[in-house]
Amino acid sequence: MRNAADIVPNWTGASKAEEPLADAIDAILPQTQCTRCGYEACRPYAQAIARGDAALNRCPPGGSAGIRALAELTGLPPLPLDPACGVEQPRRLAVVDEARCIGCTICIQKCPVDAIVGAPKQMHTVIASLCTGCELCVAPCPVDCIDLVAASDADSDWTAAQREASRSRFERRNARLAREAVRRLSHRDDAAVASTGDAPADRLAVVRAAVGRARARRAARKAAARGTGEPGDFAERAG
């Protein structure tokens, strides 16, 4: 029987001794989950910093203030923001053009913090107070109906409370996706078994398929672990 632990990302990139430092670093990061640092989320980046495998200056949303806070925490010298990761700028929010939206749900699937609501073939909308400005919804839109706009004065600050809420939504989303993946795999296995009847060859095919999926999961976990070790890995896979 599969469980969520088989599906959820395996972010164990820091040793037990390094985890307290990774926790403290993660608490400073803005939790936009934008991947611009080269890691697939804020937590793997925090773990890489704790291991000494990543520099402090790879987070554009955190900007110079974030770099200074990380330097003070770790005792490392502050550095200018790495231009390869982007530029520091005021908070921006995603906005869906209702006239062009076709309700494809792609942006909903891409949002790491569940800040977009809608239904298939229905207009989608971004909840401004939840949007992290990660930009991950913009490029995949097939009709180019999502723009990034400057946040209003009321929404311009990204507070500590919003940061913590964003982390919680990201973690809940990952847990939900893991449960859904488990259900899909279980239903597929049940359907495959039901279709085998008494044919030995069919039953053997089901067994082989199950073994293949188990091997794929192990390979994915290993790939995820490697991905948290080098800052360019996720960017290359995403590209």
Image (tube, rainbow, N blue to C red):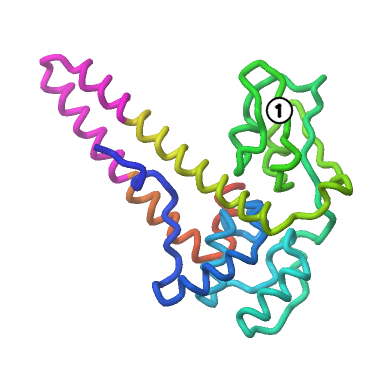
- Horizontal arrangement in the rendering, residue 177 relative to residue 119 (left or right): left
Q: Where does the image place residue 132, in percent across and percent down from the top left?
A: 71, 48
Magenta stretch, overall SS:
helix
How many marks do you count on the picture?
A: 1
Q: Where does the image place residue 113, in percent across and percent down from the top left?
A: 61, 43
The verdict on residue 188 being magenta is yes
Vertical placement of residue 82 versus 160, above or below: below
Task: Name the quadrant containing residue 138.
Answer: top right
Task: Name the quadrant containing residue 148.
Answer: top right
Q: Residues within 10 Å of mark 1 (few under 14, many from 20)?
A: few
Q: Where does the image place residue 88, in percent across and percent down from the top left?
A: 81, 61
Q: Is residue 146 or residue 170 the one in the foreground?
A: 170
For disc 1, the marked residue is 142
Q: Amino acid at mark 1?
A: Pro
- Residue at (82%, 19%) from the top-left corner? 99
Residue numbers of the magenta segment = 186-215
- Horizontal arrangement in the rendering, residue 29 relative to residue 197 (left or right): right
Q: Where does the image place residue 203, in percent across and percent down from the top left?
A: 16, 24
- Residue at (66%, 74%) from the top-left corner? 70
Task: Name the quadrant containing residue 115.
Answer: top right
- Horizontal arrangement in the rendering, residue 102 relative to residue 51 (left or right): right
The verdict on residue 116 being magenta is no
